[in-house]
Amino acid sequence: MNEKWSMRAPRVRVVRPLRVDPGGRIGPTKGQAHGPGWRRTAEGLYVPAAVDDSVVEQRIVEQGARLRRGVVTGWAALRLLGGGYFDGLARDGRTRLPVTIAANGDRLRSGPLADVRRVAVDEADVVIRYGVRCASPERALFDAVRWQPLLVERVVSIDMAAAAELTSPRRVTAYVMGHREVHGRMVVMEATWWAQEGAESPQEVRLRLIWRRRFSWPPPLANRTVVDLGGRRLGTPDLVSEELGMGAEYDGAEHRKRGRHRRDVRRLDDFQRAGLEVATFVGEDLDDEELVVGRLRAARHRAGRSPRYVRHDDD
């Protein structure tokens, strides 16, 4: 996904697909539907050809419009509910993900545009967003996590849903405990154990998981402001451990801008002067786990030789 993103997805304008109308009043006529002015979104459904389906919400609504009992769920429902991270693109930032749908009794087939799962969703777990039947935040996240093959990405989904204030690890855990018969619940429970509120970016979550999986050190805290003993606020690293006297952070593309880079260098110097060693990662560093481990270990070694004159501010 893009380096720059918002935790909350903005409300956007979408165009709901229409069925053929012989009179042409509330939809295209049959002739118009097959002409250049309209685009087919599903069997019997059309939108004006000028409607841009690169807007992820539009793409989801086009698939959701054909549902009767079915429910948009997983990443797609989380997007309609306001999750900024859930942009409908794979990790390469280009490949479109199919819209995830719980068939719920509808006769639907999977295809390039939709990933249909033969599962049921209770009506108590259905909400309407953009005029589409969507799973509730807890159910949508439950599905997104259990259908994700990688533990790291499962945890990222939970943390980013929490960052958007859609739900929380605690509420997801409660949902799982109330649905013991649903397949995949243990996968979701494992992911909630690794999840943590307070994360502000997916790369920060991936970095935290390497720290926690590879070391027996105390778990780091997320986005806690560091102050020196004089009370001066020095900054807010992505991850920080007061016990270890070290932290870590991922610098995205926005950090490479001249003014931002200068402030970052000065901030790192302030951290070091106060006794906090911060390991910094950029670009594709997190794809090389051994590089991350080595850099974290080096920061820990330096922190062990330095006096600790820092604390984190819980506010």
Image (spheres, helix red, strand yellow):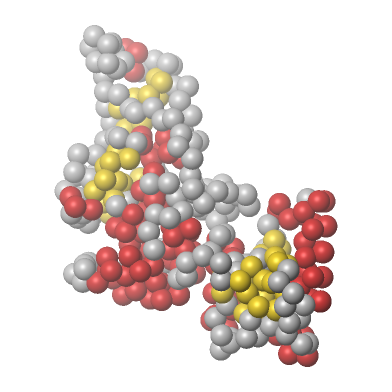
- 261 w.r.t. 197: above or below: above
Residue 81, placed above or below residue 215: above
Q: Is residue 143 visible?
A: no
Q: Is residue 171 above or below residue 54?
A: below
Q: Nearer the viewer, residue 92 or 73?
A: 73
Residue drawn at x 29%, y 50% is 135
x 39%, y 71%: residue: 192
In the foreground, 94 or 34: 94
Viewer-proximal residue among 91 and 201: 201
Residue 35 position, x and y percent, is 39, 15
- Give how far across and how far down residue 148 sits, in percent: 41, 63
Quadrant, the C terminus? bottom right
In the rendered view, would you say 170 is above or below 255?
below
| Residue closest to the far front | 230
Query: Relative to residue 95, is residue 191 drawn left or right?
Result: left
* Residue 211 in view of the camera: yes
Which quadrant of the figure has residue 121? bottom left
Q: Residue at x 33, y 54 (%)?
A: 137
Query: Where is residue 41, by image quadrant?
Result: top left
- Residue at (39% x, 63% y) in the render: 168
Q: Position of residue 299 (x, y in %)?
A: 73, 81
List the single residue furthest toward the top.
23
